[in-house]
Image: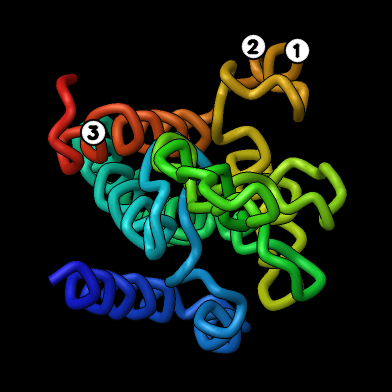
Amino acid sequence: MKEESILIKSSELKYALLDTKREGISKLSGKLQEIGFFDAPASGGNHENRKGGLCIHSFNVYRNAHRIAQALLSPNDYENMKDSITIVSILHDVGKCGDYGKPLYVPKMIKNKKYKKSDPDAEPEYIQSDAMPYQHNPELTNIPHSFRSVKIIEKYINLTEDEEYAILYHDGLYERTTGGFSVIPGHETPLLMITHWADLWASKIDEKKEKGEEV
């Protein structure tokens, strides 16, 4: 059922991107499968830390962003901004696919605590951690994933200044590595705020409910 759900969500996301008719979007949409967008986890040990989690999270952010925008913007402002909302909400975390042919997340392997070493010469058994199934790939340089997102996207389409800003700082004041704490105050934009709220609601509310956690 999970694989079917990811397939449905991936199709909807591709269709939504194509519907923007942004020059180059067809090529970018076609590359998502190749770079691992529909298979990658969304985090190491937090929200949607499982195979296909990035696709699920991106769908949740896309859905939330349009709901927020329709509730808060005038009909005319929403119409003018809806393509930007689609592109930014779906692709804000595309940098989590990794870069240079290397995934951003790799399985986090730990010693099996249940392993009994009956043979003193036996090698310890390693299993994937339940608490933190994935970790950052040590073979990739420590560049924030939002920077990677902009880099990957702009290989195929041109982002507006507002779109680039929203992607770079979509974690809002939670994001210190990209200077969010010092850059954002006084420079909030509707697209940035919509993206941040949609992302926060997806990771802190929607995806905890999906896992059966209390919120």
Name which residue lies at 52% across and 88% down: 30
Examine the rendered structure and indicate whether residue 24 appears above or below residue 202: below
Q: Which of 114 and 187 is in front in this view?
A: 114
Q: How crowded is mark 3: few (under 14 residues within 10 Å), some or many (20 or more)?
A: some
Q: Nearer the viewer, residue 60 or 51?
A: 51
Tell me the quarter of the image containing the N terminus. Answer: bottom left
Name which residue type carries label 3. Lys
Quadrant of res 35? bottom right
Question: Horizontal placement of 110 versus 20: left or right?
Answer: right
Name which residue type carries label 1. Ser
Mark 1 lies on residue: 182
Q: How far apart are marks 1 and 2 (CA)?
A: 7 Å
Question: Horizontal placement of 181 versus 63: left or right?
Answer: right
Task: Decide if residue 80 is in sight here.
Answer: no
User: Which secondary structure lies at badge 1?
Assistant: helix
Q: Where is residue 173 in the image (x, y as percent from the top left)?
A: 59, 16
Task: Decide if residue 20 is in sight here.
Answer: yes
Question: Horizontal placement of 89 versus 97: left or right?
Answer: left
Judged by depth in the image, the label closer to the viewer, 3 or 1, is 3
Q: How far apart are marks 3 and 2 (CA)?
A: 29 Å
Q: Distance between the residues labelled 3 and 1?
A: 30 Å
- Colouring style: rainbow
Residue 185's tag is 2
Question: Horizontal placement of 105 versus 191: left or right?
Answer: right
Mark 3 lies on residue: 208
Q: Mark 3 touching mark 2, by CB under 8 A? A: no
Name which residue lies at 80% across and 50% down: 138
Tell me the quarter of the image containing the C terminus. Answer: top left
Q: Mark 1 touching mark 2, by CB under 8 A? A: yes
Q: How crowded is mark 1: few (under 14 residues within 10 Å), some or many (20 or more)?
A: few
N-terminal-most mark, 3 or 1: 1
Q: Where is residue 93 in the image (x, y as percent from the top left)?
A: 55, 52
